[in-house]
C-alpha cells in the first residue's frame, strides 16, 4: 500500500489525469473536487496534500492557512498563475513546494516523491553503506564486499566527501577546494588522477560515477 | 461678450463711487471757499463804517445784501415796513461797496444777513436768531463759529459767528446767516457736465484701452483652436511681452507636452502591435505543427497503422515549447511593467535548479539528452524574483535541449565562491554559437523582430528575457564555448544571508 495523497482539484480532466498518474506511480490518491473549510478531524489521514490555488468556493491559500493550524503534512501547491507574489505568499503560509501549470505528469510524480523522501534525512552518520561499499567516516576505514581496502589520505577524503552526499553529484571545483591540499596540488586534472586511482583500488565495483559537466557521484554500482 | 459685460459692470461699479467721492470733494471745497468769502466780506464791511452804524442804532441795524431786482426801499438801515413814498436818494447812500460779491464759479451768492451781538452774546435786535453752545464755543476757540443745518423745506441754513477786532460794545460779535434754497444745485448733485464729462472720458478710455487686449485674446483663441485642430502640430505664435504673450507661451508649452505624450503613446502602441504580431507568429507556428502531428496520428490510427513514436515526440516537444513561450510572454510583460510587478524575495537556487531540470526531464529523455546538475550541499540563497529567475534558467536549459545533438548532455552547475557570490553555469555539448553571434546576443537592448525568430540556434524571446532578467537583478552573464564542444552560459551574482 503506497502513501495516501490528498488531491484538491476542481478541473475534472486534470484531476482524473493526476489521479491516474499518482496511482500508476504507486500512490493512493484521495480526490476532492472542490475546496472545503478544513478543520481538525476532517482531514483524511494522508502523507501529502496536492492543493490547487484557484478553487470554486474557497481560495486555496485560505485552505492552506487553515490546514497549518493543526497539521504539518507536506503541501504541494498547483497554480496556473506563474506569479512570484503567489509563490512567496504560499511559502509563507506553510506550503512546501510550488508547481506551475502546465506540467508533465512525471514532473509532478517526481516532485511528490522528493517531498516525501526529504523528511527521512538523518543526521550525519559515522558509517555509510553504498552498495558493496562500507565507509567508516570516523575510523577512516573502507571495505569493499567485506574486504578492507588501503587508501591514501587524499583518496579516503575524496571517497568520504562523496559518501556524505551519497547519490548526489558533487562538483569538481568543490572537491578540489575541500579535498586536495591547496598548497601542493590544486587542479582539476590532479583530482581526476586521484579519482582514477581510487577507482582502481575499489576494484571491479563501479561506485564512483562521472557526472558529465559536473563532477562525481557515489552510486550503489551494478556489480553486486 | 462675457468678458466685456464683466468689464462694463466693473466700470460702472468703479465710476459710481468715484463720482460720489468727487461730489463730496466738490461740496467740501465749495463750502470752505464760500465761508472764506463771507468772512472776508463781513470784516471788510464792518471796518469801513459798519461799526459806527451798528453802534448808533443796534436795535434796528441789519444789513441785507442788495440785489438788482430788489426794490430800493430795502436798502440797509431801513425797516421793511417803509412805503415807496419814503424812497428816493438820500445823503449817505454813497459809502462802502455793497454786498453781493460773486462766489465760486462766478455765480452770485444768495443774500447774507448780519446781526449784532455784545460780549455776552446778547443782541438788541429782536430779529436776531438765538445762538447755541456750538457757535459760542467755536467763536471762543477759533474766532469763528460755524453751524449748518437743513430746514423742513429742504433749504440749507449756514450760520457764521464772527468776533470783531474791537472789544466791548453792542457790536462785538456779528452773525452772518445765509439760506440756500432747496432747488439750488449746491444742495444736490453738481451740474451734469461736472461729473458726466469725466465719466464719459473714463469709459471712452477704457473702451479704447481694451480694444487691443480683446483683439489679442481673440487671436490667441483662434491660434489655440487651430493648434488643437491640427493635432497640436501647429505652434501658438502670439508674441509680445505682456501677460497675454505669457499665456500664449504657456499654451505653447502645453502643446509641446501634449505632442510628446501623443508620440510616446503612439510608440508604445506600435511596440505593442509589433509584439502581438510577433507573438502570434511564435504561438501559431508550433500550434500548426502540433495540429499537423495530431492529424497525422489520427490518420494512422484510422488506417490501423501503429503510431510512430517520432510524431508523438515532436508533438510533446511543440507543446512544451508553447508552454515555455507563454511563460516567457508573462515574464516579458512583467519586465516591461517594471518595478511594481517584479517581486524580490529570498530564492534558493538549489531548489530552483532542481525544479528546472525536473520540468525539462520529460522532454529531454525522448531525445536521449542527459540532464545533470550539481549544487552545493546547503541552500544557495539569493534575493530575486523567483518566477523570472526560474524562467531565465529554464530558457537556457531548454535551448540546450532543443538544439542539442542526440545522445548529448546538458549540465547545470551551481557553486558558491569565497567572495560571497554564486556561479551558475549551463553547459551543453551541442553545436556552439560563433563568436560574432555570442557578442550580438549580449548586445544591450537586443531587440527587434530578429529576437523572436526560432532559428537559428533558438535565439529569440527566450534569450531576450534571459538578458533582461540578468540585467534587472544586477547579475553578470557570459557566453563562452564549452570544453565539450558546445556552449556554456554562466551567471554570477551576489549571495545573501540565509533567511530565517
Image (cartoon, coloured by chain):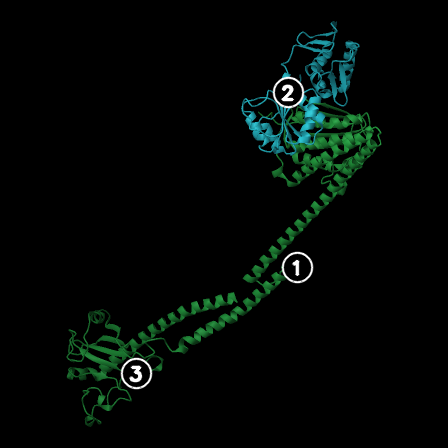
Chain colours: A cyan, B green
- Left or right: residue B94 versus residue A7 is left
| Protein chain holding label 3 | B
Give coordinates of residue A124: x percent, y percent.
Answer: 64, 13
Name the residue nearer the viewer: B233 or A28: A28
The tag on residue B230 is: 1
Give coordinates of residue B471: x percent, y percent.
Answer: 68, 36
Using the rendered view, name the quadrant where residue B104 is placed: bottom left
| Protein chain holding label 2 | A
- Left or right: residue A67 versus residue A141 is left
Name the residue nearer the viewer: B420 or B328: B328
What residue sits right under mark 3 in the picture?
A: B101
Circle 2 or circle 1, nearest the eye: 2
Looking at the image, tell me whether mark 3 or mark 1 is earlier in sequence order.
3
What residue sits right under mark 2 in the picture?
A: A4
How far is mark 2 from mark 1, CA to CA? 72 Å
Q: Mark 3 packing: few (<14 Cα in 10 Å), some, or many (20+)? A: some
| Protein chain holding label 1 | B
How far is mark 3 from mark 1, CA to CA? 78 Å
Question: In the image, is residue B10 above or below residue B484?
Answer: below
- Dot 2 and dot 1 within a common chain: no
Amino acid at each position: 500500500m503506497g502513501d495516501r495523497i490528498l488531491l484538491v482539484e476542481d478541473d475534472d480532466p486534470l484531476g482524473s489525469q493526476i489521479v491516474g498518474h499518482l496511482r500508476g506511480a504507486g500512490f493512493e490518491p484521495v480526490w476532492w473536487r472542490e475546496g472545503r473549510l478544513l478543520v481538525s478531524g476532517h482531514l483524511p489521514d494522508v502523507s501529502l496534500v496536492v492543493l490547487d490555488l484557484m478553487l470554486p468556493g474557497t481560495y486555496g491559500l485560505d485552505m492552506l492557512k487553515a490546514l497549518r493550524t493543526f497539521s504539518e503534512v507536506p503541501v504541494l501547491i498547483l497554480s496556473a498563475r506563474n506569479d512570484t507574489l503567489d509563490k512567496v505568499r504560499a511559502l509563507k503560509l506553510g506550503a512546501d513546494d510550488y508547481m506551475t501549470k502546465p506540467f508533465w505528469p512525471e514532473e509532478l510524480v517526481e516532485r511528490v516523491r522528493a517531498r516525501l523522501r526529504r523528511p527521512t534525512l538523518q543526521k550525519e552518520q559515522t558509517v555509510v553503506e553504498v552498495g558493496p561499499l562500507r565507509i567508516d567516516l570516523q575510523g577512516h576505514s573502507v571495505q569493499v564486499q567485506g574486504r578492507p581496502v588501503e587508501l591514501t589520505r587524499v583518496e579516503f577524503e575524496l571517497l568520504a566527501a562523496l559518501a556524505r552526499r551519497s547519490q548526489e553529484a558533487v562538483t569538481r571545483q568543490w572537491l578540489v577546494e575541500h579535498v586536495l591540499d591547496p598548497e601542493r596540488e590544486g587542479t582539476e586534472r590532479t583530482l581526476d588522477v586521484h579519482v582514477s586511482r581510487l577507482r582502481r583500488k575499489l576494484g571491479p565495483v563501479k561506485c564512483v560515477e562521472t557526472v558529465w559537466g559536473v563532477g562525481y557521484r557515489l552510486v550503489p554500482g551494478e556489480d553486486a | 461678450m462675457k468678458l466685456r459685460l464683466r468689464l462694463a459692470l466693473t466700470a460702472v461699479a468703479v465710476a459710481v463711487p468715484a463720482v460720489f467721492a468727487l461730489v463730496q470733494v466738490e461740496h467740501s471745497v465749495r463750502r470752505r471757499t464760500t465761508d472764506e468769502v463771507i468772512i472776508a466780506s463781513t470784516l471788510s464791511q464792518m471796518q469801513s463804517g459798519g461799526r459806527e452804524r451798528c453802534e448808533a442804532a443796534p436795535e434796528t441795524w441789519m444789513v441785507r445784501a442788495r440785489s438788482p431786482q430788489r426794490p430800493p426801499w430795502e436798502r440797509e438801515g431801513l425797516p421793511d415796513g417803509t412805503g415807496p413814498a419814503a424812497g428816493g436818494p438820500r445823503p449817505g447812500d454813497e459809502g462802502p461797496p455793497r454786498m453781493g460779491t460773486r462766489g465760486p464759479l462766478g455765480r452770485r451768492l444768495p443774500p447774507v444777513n448780519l446781526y449784532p451781538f455784545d460780549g455776552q452774546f446778547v443782541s438788541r435786535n429782536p430779529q436776531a436768531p438765538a445762538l447755541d453752545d456750538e457757535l459760542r464755543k467755536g467763536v471762543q476757540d477759533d474766532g469763528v463759529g460755524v453751524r449748518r443745518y437743513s430746514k423742513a423745506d429742504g433749504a440749507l441754513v449756514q450760520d457764521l459767528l464772527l468776533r470783531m477786532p474791537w472789544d466791548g460794545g453792542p457790536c462785538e460779535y456779528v452773525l452772518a446767516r445765509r439760506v440756500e434754497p432747496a432747488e439750488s444745485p449746491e444742495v444736490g448733485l453738481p451740474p451734469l457736465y461736472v461729473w458726466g464729462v469725466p465719466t464719459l472720458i473714463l469709459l471712452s478710455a477704457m473702451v479704447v484701452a481694451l480694444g487691443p487686449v480683446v483683439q489679442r485674446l481673440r487671436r490667441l483663441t483662434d491660434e489655440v483652436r487651430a493648434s488643437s485642430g491640427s493635432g497640436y502640430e501647429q505652434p501658438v505664435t502670439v508674441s509680445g511681452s505682456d501677460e497675454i504673450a505669457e499665456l500664449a507661451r504657456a499654451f505653447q508649452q502645453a502643446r509641446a507636452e501634449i505632442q510628446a505624450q501623443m508620440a510616446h503613446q503612439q510608440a508604445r502602441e506600435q511596440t505593442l502591435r509589433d509584439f502581438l504580431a510577433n507573438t502570434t507568429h511564435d504561438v501559431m507556428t508550433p500550434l500548426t505543427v502540433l495540429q499537423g502531428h495530431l492529424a497525422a496520428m489520427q490518420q494512422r490510427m484510422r488506417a490501423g497503422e501503429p503510431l510512430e513514436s517520432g510524431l508523438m515526440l515532436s508533438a510533446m516537444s511543440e507543446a512544451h515549447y508553447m508552454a515555455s513561450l507563454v511563460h516567457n510572454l508573462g515574464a516579458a510583460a512583467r519586465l516591461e511593467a517594471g518595478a511594481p510587478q517584479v517581486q524580490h524575495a529570498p530564492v534558493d537556487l538549489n531548489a530552483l535548479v532542481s525544479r528546472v531540470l525536473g520540468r525539462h526531464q520529460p522532454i529531454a529523455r525522448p531525445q536521449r539528452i542527459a540532464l545533470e546538475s550539481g549544487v552545493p550541499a546547503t541552500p544557495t540563497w539569493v534575493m530575486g524574483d523567483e518566477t523570472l529567475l526560474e524562467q531565465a534558467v529554464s530558457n537556457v536549459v531548454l535551448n540546450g535541449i532543443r538544439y542539442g545533438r542526440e545522445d548529448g548532455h546538458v549540465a547545470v552547475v551551481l557553486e558558491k565562491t569565497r567572495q560571497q557570490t554564486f556561479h551558475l553555469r549551463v553547459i551543453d555539448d551541442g553545436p556552439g554559437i560563433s563568436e560574432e553571434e555570442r557578442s550580438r546576443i549580449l548586445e544591450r537592448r537586443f531587440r527587434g523582430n530578429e529576437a523572436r525568430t526560432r532559428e537559428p540556434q533558438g535565439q529569440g524571446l527566450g534569450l531576450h528575457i534571459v538578458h533582461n532578467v540578468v540585467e534587472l537583478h544586477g547579475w553578470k552573464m557570459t557566453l563562452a564555448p564549452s570544453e565539450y564542444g558546445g556552449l556554456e552560459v554562466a551567471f554570477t551574482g551576489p549571495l545573501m544571508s540565509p533567511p530565517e
